[in-house]
Image (cartoon, rainbow, N blue to C red):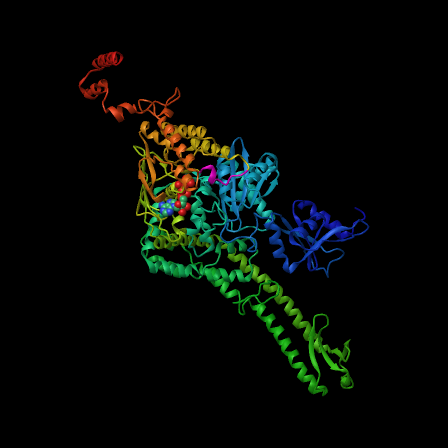
Amino acid sequence: MADLTPMMAQYNRLKRKYKDCIFFFRMGDFYEMFNEDAKIASRILGITLTSRSHGKAKKIPLAGVPWHAAEGYLARLIKAGYKVAICEQVEDSARAKGIVKREVVQVVTPGTTVSERILSHDQNNYLLAINQEDGTVGLAIVDLSTGEFELEEMNDRGLTDELQRLFPAEILLPSSRERDLVPKLRRLLPAVTVTTMDDWRFSYDDAYESLISHFQTISLKGFGCENLKMAVGAAGAALNYLKENQKAALSHIRGLATVHPSDYMMLDATTLRNLEVLAPLREELKEATLFSVLNRTKTPMGTRLLSKWLRKPLLNGIQINSRLEGVEELAKSVSLRLDIAQSLKRVVDMERLVARVGCGRANARDLNALKCSLKIIPEMKTLLKVCSSQILKEIGQELDAVTAVVKKIEQAIVDEPPLAMNEGGLIRAGYHLELDQLRQISKDGKNWIAQLQRRERGRTGIKSLKVGYNRVFGYYIEVTKPNLSLVPDDYFRKQTMANAERFITPELKEQEAKVLGAEDRIKSMEYDLFVQVRSQIAEAADKIQQNARLLARLDVLASLATVAVENDYRRPTVNDEDQISIRDGRHPVVEKLMQGEEFISNDTQMDHHSDQILIITGPNMAGKSTYLRQVGLIVLLAQMGSFVPAKEAKIGIVDRIFTRVGAMDSLATGESTFLVEMNETTNILNNATPRSLLLLDEIGRGTSTFDGLSIAWAVAEYIHNTPSVSAKTLFATHYHELTELALILPRVKNYNVAVREWQDHIVFLRKIVEGSCDHSYGIQVARLAGLPNEVIERAQEVLANLEDEELTPNKIPKLAIGPHAPPMASSPQLSLFVHQEHPVIREIKKLEINKITPLEALNILHQLMDKMNSS
Ligand SMILES: Nc1ncnc2c1ncn2[C@@H]1O[C@H](COP(=O)(O)OP(=O)(O)OP(=O)(O)O)[C@@H](O)[C@H]1O
Ligand SMILES: [Mg+2]
């Protein structure tokens, strides 16, 4: 160590605390990186790697980026998943004794950034803190760039879903959990940045203290999370981590929302993916998502909120209908919708601007942008005043014009300020007396100097005399060599040029000092005033955030209304009744992507009395999968508060949509496709409730026909016969044997997607009709493919044999029998073919129970049993 230069010693001392960060070490006009950091930076940023010796120690690798271009380089490192500590010179190098003092002023990480260069405007940027013990997971979810701060508790399975739903940029863990959690996290989110902190920082007591001191409350009761110990621990750790990285008070984080998973429809990651809600299954079809069909928002906050609503449809009928009412009003009034859109177009990303204000990183242009956005609020309030729906009226009432903020920015900041904040030119004239005086002094001095050239030309008679300025020598008077004899005595020589000499005079020196002194002071005073204005605005952060959220809500409602009008969606009836009833439903995404062809609409009728499980058969390409997804999407849309692509829809609220999509359609990699399929099926059978909607697309396709069919059969029976699971189910399959379930299970119905044969062709009619499809058309397709006639004919024979064997001689499906078979709800023989009741039943029906005594009842029971035994 003794061999190190003092600067490298300083570097090592500072870097020690930031081992997991790339260290940006400010040296003059550059940020330098050393050792491993330099190697990583040179690889990722494509900058030159050099080396330099410091003292007697061996040469060390070195790479640097110019400070004025640092933001772009920084952004690239962060996007690559690295963390960067920025270490600045914190004293003037000219005045420093010995080595200039340096300090880390900010740590930038993927989950703690507010930089526009790094963030994408249509996505939230989440930091997730996970605290886990004995099967309980406490989760804190923060988006520093918007001020959103939530916590919730769940089980391990819930965590998996939440991770894949939120796509966090960074995850924070207690050190002791690193070993068991990181491999799991890496599997789910390969690119996520993981940071660990000492376990004690997740402790309930410490976290509690940090949170109440930040929010300046005496307890957490008001946030409804007192008892969520694990989650509170996570929230405290997250908040402290953010504060340490930003080295700012984070005044824009004003509240902590407790999320109750039971308030929202559960959409697990598999379902979001299978229904292509936010991301397409095939990457190249970017537009093939529900999100892109629905997104007509005008503001970044609106775009982000839409994605949130899609991820979290509601369960509460009142809330759903309140949104629907708002969409309806906007859908009906073209002018209201257009006026709102017009105003919203002028709103910038307020949420993120306020966050930058709160982190002390907003510049003067940001403040002006904020001002312009806030200025639309009065007109928006006027527009919404005439509304009759509760939700729109409330938005109008709650919007706050924050006139004091607008006025403050207007008075203080010039119209077109520069980007830099320490070069002056930010503050408007008339805002601050002393600043105005300094500016006057500087101006007077400059005027005096400007007139000096004319005066001195007159006094000396040197026509070519010039007054000039350079950074090193300041102001000077320049006289060309031939005229040197005319120079008066009070000129002092300062610099000799090739064909001229430069002079100063005591008077000029004096004026120069005035001008330069004033300008220095102006710059620092403007900066101070700007920071003052910024912190005053930070005090109104919660009101501005509230505005941002209200405008986001309005934006989403207006977007849903626009989409509804343009695509002929209708308002669904949403309530707690037990049915899903859709007339002429369409798939919202497929119908948009159809070229030339027309999308064929279809009806759906599901309930718990007779139509609980619909088995849907039909040839390949007929439209089975499309139909399943269409029903799922319509339910999801209705519960997020959107109109739906159908002529009419009645949706009894669904608590969860589960999907299981056939192996062939699955993008799952890594695990065996069949295992993935069975894992998902297990999840469904363990978690479905009678209020759930199950979309099972070709269960069992991932294994041999017999195994697959057997599993599919048993799954359907289980769903039908287990009261706690008996969810409404759409079951698409190629195993037409499954249609026999309808013979024995009363709430199973068969449907098929109609096709017509026409001159050796199959014409897809795309209509869902009642009944089973008795043809798989596999052999027809094979014929079309040119398989030899002999083979086709033989195949038809084999097929006939197989089909013959499906029912027992007394017409019970063979698959239905066995010692573990559930009791049949009705004997198929009796109900379907004989249509005769057992005599005992007939007698029971005749009994008038009110007219017999208990003793008589016992006697009757005895007789009936005798009859039963003898028959
Ligand atoms: N209702 C409809 N109206 C018009 N076209 C449709 C309709 N439904 C589906 N299609 C078209 O048919 C194609 C195939 O549909 P889908 O994938 O749903 O068939 P499938 O029956 O599930 O086939 P497979 O058995 O091979 O999985 C879709 O990509 C779509 O282009
Ligand atoms: Mg399919």
Residue in the image at 56% along x and 61% along y: 530
Residue in the image at 66% along x and 54% along y: 46
Question: Considering depth in this image, is 208 or 304 the residue closer to the camera?
Answer: 304
* Residue 418 placement (x, y as % from top left): 57, 65
Taking the view exactly as shown, the residue that stands out farthest to the left is: 851
Which quadrant would residue 117 be assigned to in this image? bottom right
Which quadrant would residue 513 be assigned to in this image? bottom right
* Residue 2 placement (x, y as % from top left): 81, 47
Which quadrant would residue 692 be assigned to in this image? top left
* Residue 200 placement (x, y as % from top left): 60, 37
Q: Is residue 304 visible?
A: yes
Residue 327 appears left or right of 512: left
Query: Measured along the vertical axis of the image, is residue 417 above or below residue 125?
Result: below
Question: Considering depth in this image, is 826 or 65 the residue closer to the camera?
Answer: 826
Question: Considering depth in this image, is 744 or 727 the residue closer to the camera?
Answer: 744
Q: Is residue 222 visible?
A: no
In this picture, which residue range is highlighted in magenta? 661-669
